Image: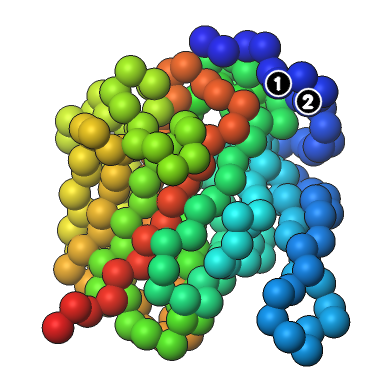
């Protein structure tokens, strides 16, 4: 279990109480397109023992709540403006303690609900999530991070718009929702459990909407 955090990082950097949402302005990124004088705000949304950021671009977080239990999952609402992969940055904001009380500690047990608005202008026919401990590198078995890999018959994976799912664990930790569709300007809900038995201070969730290939 990785208890020490990175230099200069405080586990109480974002003050919050379990189940209550607080927002902190992280930074402002200037828009590169000509004619835009305003900055594109990037925000950190802190809830429970974690914070969630859209700092890597391509989408916008619009809300966050919950502490990560089955009865009170971490709920992230988002808007995706294209049909290309985007990456959610997740950081711990409380001390790390594997299997400690949810909300008080980053305990490696994260029941998730993600509500995604399709503002891409294209219908999505599949939607894939991928976990990464190191950005742009596959999450391998030994890192302890997965979509509840130890549970061979999960009953907590569900989507409002897709009937089926597949999980892949080697060499990637991926969860693919399929046999469904999300039309433009519609919202899809995804529910699943993320586990990290060697918790890290920072990890990533790649989200990849798929469009018809034919």
Residue 6 - label: 1
Residue 54 vertical position relative to residue 2 in the rendered view, above or below? below
| Percent coordinates x, y for residue 209 in the rendering | 36, 67
Name the residue located 26 percent from the left edge and 67 percent from the top edge. Answer: 126
Q: Residue at x 57, y 13 (%)?
A: 2
Residue 156 is situated, as x and y percent measured from the top left of the image, at 32, 43
The reply to whether residue 131 is in sight is: yes
Q: Secondary structure at mark 2?
A: loop
Numbered-mark total: 2
SS for tag 1?
A: loop
Q: Is residue 123 left or right of residue 154?
A: right
On the image, the x and y values in percent for residue 31 come to 73, 73
Q: Which of 204/117 is in front?
A: 204
- Crowding near the residue tagged with mark 1, few <14, some 14–19, many ≥20 C-alpha atoms within 10 Å: few
Decide: few, some or many residues near mark 2? Use Cα within 10 Å; few <14, some 14-19, many ≥20: few
Q: Is residue 72 visible?
A: no
**Relative depth, front residue between 198 and 74:** 198
User: Contact (CB < 8 A) between labels 2 and 1?
Assistant: yes
Q: Which residue is mark 2?
A: 9
Q: Residue at x 72, y 31 (%)?
A: 93
Image location (x, y in percent) of residue 185? 47, 85
Q: Name the quadrant containing residue 20.
A: top right
Q: Nearer the viewer, residue 6 or 126?
A: 6
Q: At x 43% / y 87%, what residue is drawn?
A: 121
The image quarter in which residue 137 lies: top left
202 displayed left or right of 104 = left
Q: Is residue 129 above or below residue 15?
A: below
Vertical relation: 206 (above or below) 30: above
- Relative to 112, residue 37 above or below: below
C-alpha span from label 2 to label 1: 6 Å
Q: Is residue 25 left or right of residue 21?
A: right
């Amino acid at each position: 279990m990785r208890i020490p955090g990175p230099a200069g990082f405080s586990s109480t950097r974002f003050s919050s109480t379990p189940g209550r949402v607080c927002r902190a302005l992280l930074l402002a990124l200037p828009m590169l397109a000509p004619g835009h004088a305003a900055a594109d705000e990037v925000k950190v949304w802190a809830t429970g023992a974690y914070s969630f950021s859209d700092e890597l671009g391509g989408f916008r977080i619009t809300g966050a709540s919950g502490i990560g239990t089955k009865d009170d999952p971490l709920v992230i609402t988002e808007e995706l403006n294209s049909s290309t992969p985007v990456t959610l940055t997740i950081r711990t904001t409380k001390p790390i303690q594997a299997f400690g009380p949810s909300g008080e500690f980053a305990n490696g047990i994260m029941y998730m609900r993600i509500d995604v608005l399709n503002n891409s202008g294209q219908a999505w026919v599949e939607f894939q999530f991928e976990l990464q401990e190191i950005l742009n590198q596959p999450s391998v078995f030994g890192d302890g991070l997965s979509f509840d890999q130890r549970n061979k018959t999960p009953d907590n994976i569900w989507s409002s718009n897709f009937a089926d799912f597949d999980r892949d664990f080697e060499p990637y930790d991926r969860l693919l929702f399929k046999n469904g569709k999300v039309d433009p300007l519609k919202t899809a809900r995804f529910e699943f459990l993320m586990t990290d038995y060697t918790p890290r201070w920072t990890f990533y969730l790649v989200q990849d909407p798929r469009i018809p290939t034919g």
